[in-house]
Amino acid sequence: MKIARRAAANLSRRLNPALVAILSVLVIRAVPLSAQGTAAATSAVAPAAATNGATLARIHGVITLDGPWRFQIGDDPRWADPKFDDSAWQTVTLGQSLTEQGIDAYAGYAWYRLRVQPQQLAQFNLPGNPQLDVLVTGDSVGQLAAYVNGVEAGHTRGMTEEPVMYQSPPFVVHLSAPQADGTIVLAIQTWAGAGVSIGGGLLRKVELGAKDDVADRLTQASARQWDRHILSGMIVSFLFLCVAALGITLYLAQRNHSEYLWLGLLCLSVTVMGGAEIAFALAVLSWSIFSVVSQWTGRIFMAVALEFVLRFTGGESRKVVRGVQAFVLLLPIFYLVHLDQIYMYAGVSAEVVFIALISVMLFRAWRRGRKEAGVMLLPFLLAGIGDSIDTLLDFAAGQHWLPERFTSHRFLLGPIEFSTSTVAFTVFLGSLMAVILYRFVTVSQEEQRSAAEIEAARSVQALLIPTQLPSNRNFMLESAYLPVNGVGGDFFQVLPIQDDSILIVVGDVSGKGLQAAMNASTLVGALRNELSHDPATILNHLNQVMLGSASGMGAGKAANAVASFATCLCARIYTDGKMTIANAGHLSPYRDGREMQLAPNLPLGLVANISYEQAPFQLSQGDRLIFLSDGVVEATNHQGELFGFERTQQVSNEPARYIAQTAKRFGQNDDITVVSLYFAASGSQGSRSQQ
């Protein structure tokens, strides 16, 4: 699996080079072979008799026909004819690449010819006169057709009248009877399509042996292909698929963590990439289909990985990420329209930018305290660099800056072959698993802590919000309380007094959640123990309580409780309509749809020894007072528009529940509290002016 697909010339050599490496099983019984056309035999020989005409010893196993072969670029049906004179062709050895033997890279067709001598065939004159076969091994996507004495004896899947590139496994050719001179002419036609620069040669190995021995070699080659290229890819793809399922499951459980969804999509894109490579290695997909699929899956992986890191790190550099995503998703278009040079340079540039951007985002997140970002930084960097090394080596070899043997370097660990990118992706998968487990544990702990806070908040909430309001024949009260997070810092109290007057207190502690609720409960507790019923005196006392609460938290907690203050409005209303109000930075109440004018003052908990002032008002029969918190005014819709004072005034003469629900539907983002009082006493003075 690759972070990005290579250029066609280089990728065609990377996917399955190990098909040509097959172990030899030999029994040494023969004299040295020196006949023309015989390569270094994989079975050794020893003299069986003196020079008096004794027969040669017999060979069990196979011999490798390395050459010298006759080689010619181009295509002509006559070149399969055993009588064709190939003496003018160049000679090559299969053990070396063509470029190392002085032949320039080419494209399209080429032919190899070899005449197997009678002496070589005689080595296999075993009891029972067994059938002799040839095992032909090609190079990756190169297609081959083998001719024995001018008759086609076998070919790869894609070598048809209209050839198509598939991954080419080894295939077996049955030898026919020798010609009259005792020789057998092998002619092998090779082809690779446009975009593949052939420098190493498409014919890697030809082995001659008895039918059973060659069949064993073919079985070994197939098993080796599975062990080194298919099984490992299946295992890694399956692991990524499991992590993808885990990420999507976590997202369904915690939809507010979108990084889980993008983690699942990231692993799913890697799974698709691996599945495509496995299908190509099994010759299920042709090169033309695989190259298109691999181009898009590789670039989609880059775009999804950037989105995952963006969500994971908190959303910084959003515009830069969007630009890089658009760039990498456009890259396959250059490949599809055959702008190979532009695609090559742009692809290398995209990978460098991709690695740098992800590294910077993870590093910044780690510096901001996200430990899991530090866990992912090194594996992400290794995955990117490991794959880019392959890319850069392929690019340099394609430009002839480095020898071809440096392209797509692979390693052996025992019988297993792997690439740098495979190791990097495995380490990368391990880091993803570590991050998921770390995040899962962290989120679980936070959820447990939140559950405990919510349970504690429920008990606190009973102190902040009265369940029943003391309505009587003089006052009709109703209320609505809508916390934004289950519990908040808004509070109100309606306290009846012995002279049948009532005391209404509405407040809002800074912050949200349990801490704000605890501060509010402190104020409510102090209010219920307050002996005075004078609004200004009450606010003066609550101010000292708020200051004392902040100073008693200690240095460490106080540092985390920045700007711990509270706004509060206190009003005492008598049965004759007389009302006295004191305000500590809270919103003014509304009287019959009009905002009452109160002198501004500082909130509670900011300045010690402050003296709050109170103002007298006179209510008339039928007046309606609305006390509310700033959650109504500051409600914000999806367009960022505030509910505002004008809309608040328009609904201020409505019932409390209607006002609260209207603000919530508009776009609640803070606690909403509304207390409505209807003055019904008949003995009021009837004046609405301030006394």
Image: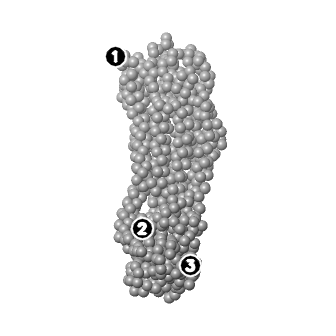
Give amino acid for label 1.
Gly
Camera-side mark, 3 or 1:
3
Q: Residue at x 54, y 73 (%)?
A: 591
Q: Which residue is mark 3?
A: 688
Answer above or below: position of 148 versus 689: above
Residue 624: x %, y % from top left: 51, 72
Label 3 close to label 2 by CB (< 8 Å) = no
Q: Quadrant of residue 652?
A: bottom right
Q: Amino acid at mark 2?
A: Val
Amino acid type indicated by mark 3? Arg
* Pair 3/2: label in front: 3
Judge the density around disc 2: few (<14), some (14-19), many (≥20) Cα neighbours within 10 Å.
many
Q: Nearer the viewer, residue 121 or 521?
A: 521
**Does label 3 or label 1 sit earlier along the sequence?**
1
Q: Is residue 563 visible in the rendered structure shown here?
A: no
Disc 3 to disc 2, C-alpha distance: 37 Å
Quarter of the C terminus within the rendering: bottom right
Query: Which residue matches tag 2?
Result: 487
Q: In which quarter of the view is residue 342 placed?
A: top right
Q: Is residue 351 above or below residue 503?
A: above
Q: Residue 9, percent across and down? A: 58, 37
Mark 1 lies on a secondary structure that is loop
SS for tag 3? loop
Taking depth in this image into account, of 3 and 639 the one nearest to the observer is 639
Residues under labels 2 and 1: Cα distance? Answer: 93 Å
Q: Earlier in the sequence, mark 3 or mark 2?
A: 2
Residue at mark 3 to residue at mark 1: CA–CA distance = 126 Å
Q: To which residue does mark 1 refer?
A: 128
Q: Where is 155 relative to 352, above or below?
A: above
